[in-house]
Image (spheres, grey):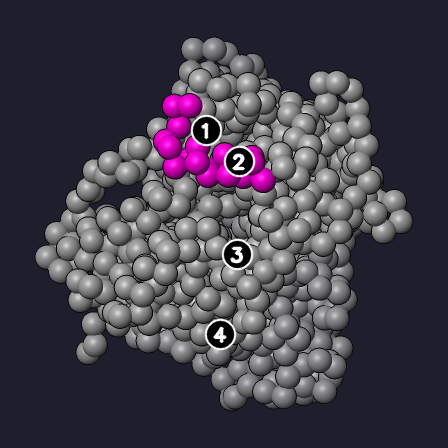
């Protein structure tokens, strides 16, 4: 077997979580290799929208971590690796009918409790945003959030030349010894003191005991037009509900209308329990687009040019998995970010890098990070036995 | 419940041939085409009130008379957007419909290829095929001074048709040296030779210069005219013209239909393999017969060996040798600012900025190649050739990733108006 060398830390997976972690590790002075089976942003991070949004997070640890990540993303965008990646912009949440109205009330209460990183700017109806369709009964405008395409964030982190990039190279296995960890790449291998596995939905190929499940989402892209008509994403309240509600029980289609910097629109999305990026269907396109065009009638003059599905890594209890792998002292897991990984990537990369360097987590976040520890599943399994 | 229709996309020789055989066997058939009338590439019909430019008109008239005597539904000015994994097809345009066909026949015809050159995206530079469509639908030769350039027998055909309509092209610039292979040529089927001889006689009589082993190296706008620099074995030449028709051969065209266990999919004619008109009709009829039999008996489709296909394949291989050239290498020498992806304006420099061996994701996400309306169907070949060590080698089948629906952009207003006879489940089908 060819020996490819020894590093302080090896990060597996060049999605947005792995790229952020690798970047934070080299800032701390560690030697770092980043390994990917295909290449940068090859999975979820290259097939997603890029809302950096607190509004869409479940209350509790996720909403608090997202708030911290939003503030930190703004810092990294000011003069750091996310300089070309992150763009602040308003968020619009809209709804029709009582269920969506109640979801918007709950959102306002949640934001109030989180401090002032994201603020409610206006609360009204369709006339609050010129161009909105009359079918919109309630519309609120939030300030403080932004947008960051996953692949642009990955490219930003990878610009640091100190990260040694190794791809295409699929990790076949890990062997932990007293001296370190051996990363098996088939015909080659690598050595490291610490390994961080940021493998997204593929986590279970190396860690089958982790309850990571695929959850696909369909996305549709329009042709270009004059940019700027819609200043920020228009998100249906049903999409907020979709994070906690069975898709079939949603009051209306869970539409998000995202204006891209190219003048295109990205329309999403669904939550489906499979891992097949080829499953994109016309019936879903028609239902999402019908509501999207009712909400933003300018869409009626556009054409759909692209359709694809991204596969999120969901976890059985709805929380990500971050921390030492059960039974390991050298391998850290960072996965299961479902629909929130772009938003959380800045803070998670920083905190996972601290863990790998044996530093304590940022004090204000330690409780919420502890809730993400992988050991929560081993405890369950032992309890059940 | 009425029996589901077979959807035939494309009303050219292959599509109509298949539709006739399916209908004759009792299968309900819907033929969709984005054009206003049946005809396809070779038998494209004139607009109302315009004269027909017919070659082999008798063949077409017979076929269309056969079709008209059978119960076939037609949807013209209607685009096929694709077939999804559930077996649903979307039609949009004059007919807007989501349908679940009993089977899908793709008879989309070939795709015309145009190799990037300096100035190829200027106004009044089109494909030679587009000039031919204009000629056939208007019944008139494209006006002004026209230069035809590139590679393949279509250039001579278009030039002869223009000449017969009174406006011969200024010149034909051909990459290959097709007349340097008399022995190969003589081995072509008689029908090919007869057709070629007819075109050549017209061109010689009109003294249309045919420059062989010659290349258009740059097109520049000069006022309302185009100045075209041509390299020939005898030295450079410059033509001042009003229009340029480029053509670098034709390619098969069957990508973008998602595999679906529920709906048999059959690609026929040039979209499956570029073999020309005779083969397209034969493949359409044979495919229609085999598909009808399979649908009736519930048996798998048997492929009928066809002597026509075998003969045309051999003839096309000979033609390919006659028209072989090494001009692909010129891609590597183009100025960095040359556009290779027309949809998104991506240049050779943009491609080179991605490094020596970019991955598909990097080509798409960072380079934006294949991210426009054509989804890489047109530019994929040039992106692949321009990044290959040897641009002359055949490029991979899907250099910018697997093609997906939509096959062509879907107007959102049409999509919303589409009626659904699929009985599709409410959105979305699953989720816990
Ligand atoms: C439709 C959709 C919309 C979304 N919208 C948003 C949004 O608006 N905002 C937001 O914050 N998030 C959003 N997300 C979620 C976000 O995309 C993910 O949470 C995030 O990208 C996950 O990043 P990751 O690095 O954990 O995983 P991934 O990006 O999946 O990266 C995993 C990497 O590991 C590599 N890998 C796997 N196995 C191996 C192996 N054995 N050896 C080597 N390498 C391997 C893969 O090639 C891949 O590059 C969305 C997701 C989808 C699908």
- Position of B247 relative to A258 (above/below): above
- Position of A109 relative to B146 (above/below): below
Q: Please provide the residue range marked out in magenta.
A: B186-202
Q: Nearer the viewer, mark 1 or mark 3?
A: 3
Q: Secondary structure at mark 4?
A: loop
Tag 3, which chain?
B
Q: Quickly name the residue at label 3.
A: B53
Q: CA distance from mark 3 to mark 4?
A: 26 Å
Task: Say which mark, if any, is on residue B319.
Answer: 1
Q: CA distance from mark 3 to mark 2?
A: 18 Å
Q: Nearer the viewer, mark 3 or mark 4?
A: 3
Which residue is at 76% across, 60% downward?
A: A88
Quarter holding the C terminus of chain B is bottom left
Q: Residues within 10 Å of mark 3 (few under 14, many from 20)?
A: some
Q: Residue A260 appears at what percent x and percent y?
A: 68, 59
Q: Quickly name the residue at label 4.
A: B94
Q: Earlier in the sequence, mark 1 or mark 2?
A: 2
Q: Is residue A200 magenta?
A: no
């Amino acid at each position: 077997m060819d020996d490819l060398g020894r590093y302080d830390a090896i990060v597996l997976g060049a999605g947005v979580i792995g790229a952020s972690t690798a970047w934070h590790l080299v800032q701390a002075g560690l030697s770092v290799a980043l390994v990917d089976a295909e290449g940068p942003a090859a999975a979820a991070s290259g097939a997603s929208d890029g809302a950096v949004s607190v509004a869409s997070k479940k209350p509790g640890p996720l909403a608090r971590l997202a708030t911290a990540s939003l503030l930190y993303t703004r810092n990294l965008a000011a003069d750091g690796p996310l300089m070309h990646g992150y763009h602040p912009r308003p968020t619009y949440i809209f709804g029709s009918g009582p269920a969506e109205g109640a979801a918007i009330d709950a959102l306002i209460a949640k934001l109030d409790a989180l401090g002032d990183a994201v603020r409610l700017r206006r609360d009204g109806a369709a006339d609050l945003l010129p161009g909105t369709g009359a079918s919109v009964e309630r519309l609120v405008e939030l300030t403080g959030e932004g947008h960051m395409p996953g692949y642009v964030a990955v490219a930003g982190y990878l610009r640091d030349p100190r990260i040694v990039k190794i791809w295409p190279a699929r990790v076949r296995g890990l062997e932990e010894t007293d001296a370190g960890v051996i990363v098996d790449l088939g015909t080659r291998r690598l050595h490291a003191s610490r390994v961080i596995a940021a493998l997204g939905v593929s986590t279970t190929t190396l860690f089958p005991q982790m309850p990571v499940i695929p959850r696909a989402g369909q996305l549709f892209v329009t042709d270009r037009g004059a940019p700027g008509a819609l200043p920020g994403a228009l998100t249906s309240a049903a999409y907020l509900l979709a994070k906690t509600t069975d898709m079939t029980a949603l009051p209306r289609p869970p539409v998000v209308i995202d204006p891209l910097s190219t003048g295109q629109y990205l329309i999403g999305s669904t939550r489906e329990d499979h891992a097949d990026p080829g499953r994109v269907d016309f019936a879903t396109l028609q239902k999402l687009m019908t509501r999207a065009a009712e909400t933003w009638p300018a869409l009626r003059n556009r054409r759909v040019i692209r359709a694809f599905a991204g596969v999120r890594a969901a976890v059985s209890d709805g929380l990500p998995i971050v921390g030492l792998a059960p039974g390991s002292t050298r391998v850290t897991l960072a996965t299961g970010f479902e629909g929130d990984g772009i938003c959380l990537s800045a803070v998670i990369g920083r905190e996972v890098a601290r863990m790998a360097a044996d530093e304590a987590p940022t004090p204000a976040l330690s409780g919420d990070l502890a809730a993400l520890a992988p050991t929560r599943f081993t405890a369950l399994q032992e309890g059940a036995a | 419940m009425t029996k589901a229709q077979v959807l035939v996309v494309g009303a050219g020789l292959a599509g109509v041939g298949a539709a006739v055989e399916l209908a004759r066997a009792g299968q309900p058939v819907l033929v969709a085409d984005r054009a206003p009338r049946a005809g396809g590439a070779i038998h494209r019909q004139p607009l109302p009130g315009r004269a027909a430019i017919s070659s082999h008109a008798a063949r077409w008239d017979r076929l269309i008379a056969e079709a008209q005597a059978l119960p076939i539904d037609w949807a013209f000015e209607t685009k096929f957007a694709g077939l999804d994994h559930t077996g649903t097809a979307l039609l949009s345009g004059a007919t807007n419909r989501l349908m679940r066909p009993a089977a899908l026949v793709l008879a989309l015809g070939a795709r015309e290829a145009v190799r990037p050159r300096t100035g190829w995206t200027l106004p009044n530079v089109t494909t030679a095929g587009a000039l031919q469509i204009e000629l056939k639908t208007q019944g008139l030769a494209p006006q002004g001074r026209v230069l035809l350039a590139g590679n393949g027998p279509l250039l001579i055909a278009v030039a002869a048709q223009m000449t017969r309509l009174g406006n011969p092209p200024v010149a034909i610039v051909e990459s290959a040296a097709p007349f340097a292979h008399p022995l190969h040529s003589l081995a072509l089927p008689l029908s090919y030779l007869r057709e070629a001889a007819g075109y050549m006689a017209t061109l010689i009589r009109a003294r249309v210069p045919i420059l062989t082993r010659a290349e258009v190296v740059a097109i520049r706008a000069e006022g309302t005219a185009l100045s075209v620099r041509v390299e020939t074995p005898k030295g450079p030449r410059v033509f001042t013209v009003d229009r340029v028709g480029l053509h670098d051969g034709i390619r098969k065209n069957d990508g973008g239909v998602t595999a679906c266990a529920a709906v048999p999919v059959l690609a026929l004619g040039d979209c499956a393999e570029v073999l020309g008109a005779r083969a397209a009709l034969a493949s359409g009829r044979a495919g229609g017969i085999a598909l009808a039999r399979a649908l009736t008996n519930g048996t798998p489709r048997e492929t009928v060996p066809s002597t026509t296909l075998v003969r045309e394949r051999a003839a096309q291989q000979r033609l390919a040798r006659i028209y072989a050239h090494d001009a692909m290498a010129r891609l590597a020498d183009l100025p960095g600012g040359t556009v290779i992806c027309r949809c998104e304006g991506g240049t050779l420099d943009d491609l080179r900025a991605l490094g020596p061996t970019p991955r598909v994701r990097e080509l798409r996400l960072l380079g934006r190649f294949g991210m426009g309306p054509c989804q890489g169907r047109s530019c994929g070949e040039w992106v692949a050739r321009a990044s290959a060590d040897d641009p002359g080698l055949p490029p991979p089948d899907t250099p910018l990733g697997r093609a997906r629906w939509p096959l062509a952009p879907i107007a959102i207003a049409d999509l919303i108006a589409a009626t659904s006879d699929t009985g599709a489940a409410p959105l979305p089908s699953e989720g816990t």
